[in-house]
Image (tube, rainbow, N blue to C red):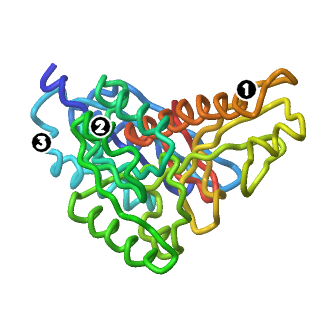
Amino acid sequence: MYNNEIKYLLTVRCPDTTGISAAIFNYIYNNDGFITSSYNYGDPSTNTFFVRIVFTAITSKMGTLEDIRQKFRPVADKFSMQWEINDYNYKPRVMIAVSKYGHCLNDLLHKTQSGQIPINIVAVVSNHSDMKEMTQWHGVNYFHFPVTPETKIEEEKKIINLIDELEVDLIVLARYMQILSSDMCKALEGRCINIHHSFLPSFKGAMPYSQAYSRGVKIVGATAHYVTSDLDEGPIIEQAVERVDHTYSVEDIGATVRDLETLTLSRAVKWHAERRILLNGNKTVVFR
């Protein structure tokens, strides 16, 4: 096949109606494309259709990436699509924000370096300096932006400026223990992922592990979600739970939750990087 090592990735979100899949498949076929992976889902509750297709070029007819996009526009316009066609092998530029807990950061650094997550970590930012040595050991630049109530807005502007300067595609809050302002949440809409514990029942505020221990919880968990101005209530990407029992100490519960946080966050970042996640109002469609 021609250029079969070059893959393209199409994602679509549009009002659900007849003929969408046929139009997309015909477009790829008529331009000498070959589909290697295809997912679709129609949500009856929102009347929205979602598509993720990976395809290659059999001949030179398909042209450049920009040619491919231009040829698809008539199809997209006909069905009022929100869509993207990208180079399948493109690795998103990622900034990680962290505070004093390094388990999620360490996991993401390792999995990126070992090729398990297809991203390019271009910076780590923090309101503390605790994770500087570990980050720099991995060859990643570390930026310290100390935050106080008086300097919060100013420090957020510095982070946003750095995001623009480094052309960051995705921001990951890897246990970054600062509440983002509404303005920053809006600026990062759809491209900022957060991780937090999700005890069942949920315990908010200080010392959540101690609260869970004192109530004798039997299930603990973690949730990865997109950031919105509603604290910890953005569209959920992935969740994981684990059983605990009366033998678990506060420290044991904390260690179990941290393991779940690393697993859940790395999955969410990987799926976002692979464009497997499509927003569906307050929910997500995840093609795994």
- Label 3: element kind: loop
Nearer mark to the viewer, of 1 and 3: 1
Nearest to the eye among marks 1 and 2: give it: 1
Q: Nearer the viewer, residue 98 or 117?
A: 98
User: Which residue in the structure is indicated by mark 2?
Assistant: 28
Quarter occupied by the N terminus: top left
Q: Residue at x 83, y 37 (%)?
A: 213
Please, what is the three-letter code of the amino acid marked with disc 1?
A: Glu
Q: Earlier in the sequence, mark 1 or mark 2?
A: 2
Amino acid on which disc 2 is placed: Ile
Is residue 56 shown above or below 231?
above
As measured in the structure, the alpha-carbon distance from the residue carrying label 1 to the one carrying label 3 is 49 Å
Residue behind mark 1: 242
Label 3 environment density (alpha carbons within 10 Å; few <14, some 14–19, many ≥20): few
Label 1 neighbourhood size at 10 Å, few (<14), some (14-19), many (20+)? Answer: some
> What's under tag 3, amino acid-wise?
Gly
Give the percent coordinates (x, y) of residue 89. Answer: 24, 34
